[in-house]
């Protein structure tokens, strides 16, 4: 008899054979990277469970939501407003992929000289191995980098894709444009799902839900300022990666519980690495599931990652909408204006991102910064000289790394990371 999971995946039109090939190595990899860590916080058990059922438990919830008349919206960028989707009765899920497995399939269609995040995601689409993508009733792309926006054009052939125009600057005209784009998404959701106009109450509730999740993550990051670090960078990265999938309220309460445990650890002076271990800020492109390579290399070389200035890190959690406004228009304006506080390299000029990196390096008491970009991500690579200059002036050591999702360069990366840790001299 077919397993419950296979029935679920088959009902979503997935390619079960390819999906099995993709998923089967994961438990061993997870054991090696996460479960083998000494002195892990007990609160990570919840996130281990979420991960062990990442393609089943949460997906069952999404399917149940759809069966009750709800809808699921996939997103690829932290600017797309989860708050609005939730307020209108949808469940938002992040669809960016960080797996090398699906890259070869994508390269049969797309140029090889393209960002691996786009290729991995595109490969998920071609191979039908992502139950989240398969469960989506609407997928929202955005005009951030050229690679993404042209990939949407191809994916629109087989997926219910809608594209938001993200401005490239942050002046008054751009603010107006993004406001109208957020209203455009609202209209699209109304038309597609016969959804009601979101009420003031539903918008306030959705903002509070998302803000609670972001606050819990912010507190987690603040706890990582302690030496010894009470949680590994790997575990913290995993938590923020799962923020894109899990139920926001359940997720927030689990992160809050984890934070309580970490506070007690800090009080006892207990950590995951000896006090005085080299502390690194990671800055650069997003690290979507299951991209754990750099953190694993760093933390098995004696360092500890104390924050991520990425979209699977601070760019996801730092800016928030205001949930106290009293009219629908003001609440939607506040949801849209959140973009002003998020500093992706696709904006120009973008000095705030350099300020963020310096501020984070100081607040997290980092001994150095690893600037990590995906190959062919021009926007982040072109911001490197400015970041390098600012870090030099601030006297903060810097290592620049360009790496994709494959393990091919693991040996070379590990040599470079170890040399950097030695250079930091801790
Ligand atoms: S807000 S980082 S999620 S666009 S896909 S820009 S890595 S070449 S993901 Fe992004 Fe939104 Fe910005 Fe964040 Fe580069 Fe690749 Fe483009 Fe990328």
Image (cartoon, helix red, strand yellow):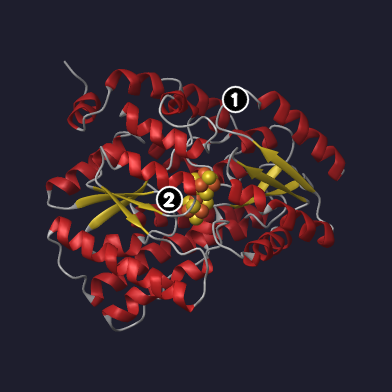
Q: Residue at x 69, y 39 (%)?
A: 401
Nearer to us of marks 1 and 2 is 1
Q: Examine the rendering and report whether any part of residue 12 can be seen.
A: yes
From what the image shows, is residue 161 above or below residue 177? above
Residue at left offset 25%, top offset 65%: 186
Can residue 52 be seen at all in this image of the molecule? no
Q: Which residue is mark 1?
A: 407
Query: Residue at 36% across / 80% down in the picture?
Result: 324
Q: Quadrant of residue 164?
A: bottom left
> SS at mark 2?
loop
Can you give x and y, in whole percent of width and height, for residue 27 in the image? 45, 24
Establish if 132 lies above or below 365: above
* Label 2 Cα neighbours within 10 Å, binned few <14 / some 14-19 / many ≥20: many
Residue 395 location in percent, x, y? 84, 58
Q: Position of residue 172 (x, y in %)?
A: 47, 78
Q: Look at 21% across and 70% down and name the residue there.
A: 198
Closer to the N terminus: mark 1 or mark 2?
A: 2
SS class of the residue under badge 1?
A: loop
Q: Quadrant of residue 181?
A: bottom left
The part of the image, by quadrant, that contains residue 124 is top left
Is 117 displayed left or right of 20 in the figure? right
Label 1 vs label 2: CA separation? 25 Å
Pick whichever, 143 or 351, lies toward us.
Answer: 143
Is residue 342 shown above or below 57? below
In the visual, does 44 lie left or right of 75? right
Q: How many badges with numbers are in the image?
A: 2
Between residues 13 and 156, which one lies in front from this camera angle? 156
For residue 359, side relative to residue 137 (left or right) = right
The verdict on label 1 being within 8 Å of ligand 1 is no
Disc 2 target residue: 243
């Amino acid at each position: 008899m077919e397993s419950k999971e296979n029935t679920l995946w088959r009902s979503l039109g997935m390619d079960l054979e390819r999906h099995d090939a993709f998923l089967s190595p994961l438990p061993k990899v997870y054991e090696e990277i996460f479960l083998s860590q000494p002195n892990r916080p007990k609160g990570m058990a919840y996130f281990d469970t979420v991960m062990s059922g990442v393609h089943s438990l949460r997906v069952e919830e999404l399917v149940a939501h759809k069966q009750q008349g709800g809808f699921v919206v996939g997103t690829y960028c932290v600017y797309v407003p989860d708050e609005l989707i939730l307020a209108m009765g949808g469940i938002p899920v992040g669809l960016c992929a960080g797996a090398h497995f699906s890259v070869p399939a994508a390269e049969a269609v797309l140029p090889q000289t393209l960002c691996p995040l786009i290729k991995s995601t595109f490969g998920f689409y071609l191979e039908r191995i992502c139950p989240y993508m398969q469960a989506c009733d609407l997928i929202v792309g955005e005009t951030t980098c050229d690679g993404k926006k042209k990939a949407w054009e191809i994916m629109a052939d087989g997926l219910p894709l809608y594209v938001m125009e993200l401005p490239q600057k942050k002046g008054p005209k751009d603010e107006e444009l993004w406001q109208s784009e957020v209203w455009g998404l609202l209209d699209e959701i109304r038309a597609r799902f016969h959804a009601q106009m979101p009420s003031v109450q539903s918008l306030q509730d959705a903002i509070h839900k998302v803000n609670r999740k972001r606050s819990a993550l912010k507190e987690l990051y603040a706890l990582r300022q302690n030496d010894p670090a009470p949680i590994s960078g790997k575990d913290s990265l995993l938590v923020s990666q799962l923020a894109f999938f899990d139920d926001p309220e359940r997720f927030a309460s689990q992160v809050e519980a984890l934070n309580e445990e970490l506070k007690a650890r800090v009080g006892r002076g207990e950590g995951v690495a000896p006090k005085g271990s080299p502390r690194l800020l990671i800055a650069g492109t997003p690290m979507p599931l299951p991209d754990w390579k750099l953190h694993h290399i760093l933390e098995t070389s004696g360092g500890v990652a104390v924050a991520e200035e990425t979209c699977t890190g601070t760019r996801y959690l730092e800016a928030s909408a205001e949930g106290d406004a009293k009219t629908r228009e003001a609440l939607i304006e506040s949801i849209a204006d959140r973009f002003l506080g998020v500093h992706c390299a696709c904006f120009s000029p973008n000095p705030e991102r350099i300020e963020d990196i310096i501020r984070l390096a100081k607040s997290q008491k980092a001994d150095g910064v690893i600037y990590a970009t995906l190959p062919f991500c021009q926007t982040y690579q072109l911001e490197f000289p400015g970041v390098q200059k600012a870090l030099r002036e601030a006297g903060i050591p810097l290592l620049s790394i360009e790496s994709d999702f494959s393990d091919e360069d693991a040996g070379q990366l590990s040599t470079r990371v170890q040399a950097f840790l030695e250079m930091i001299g801790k």
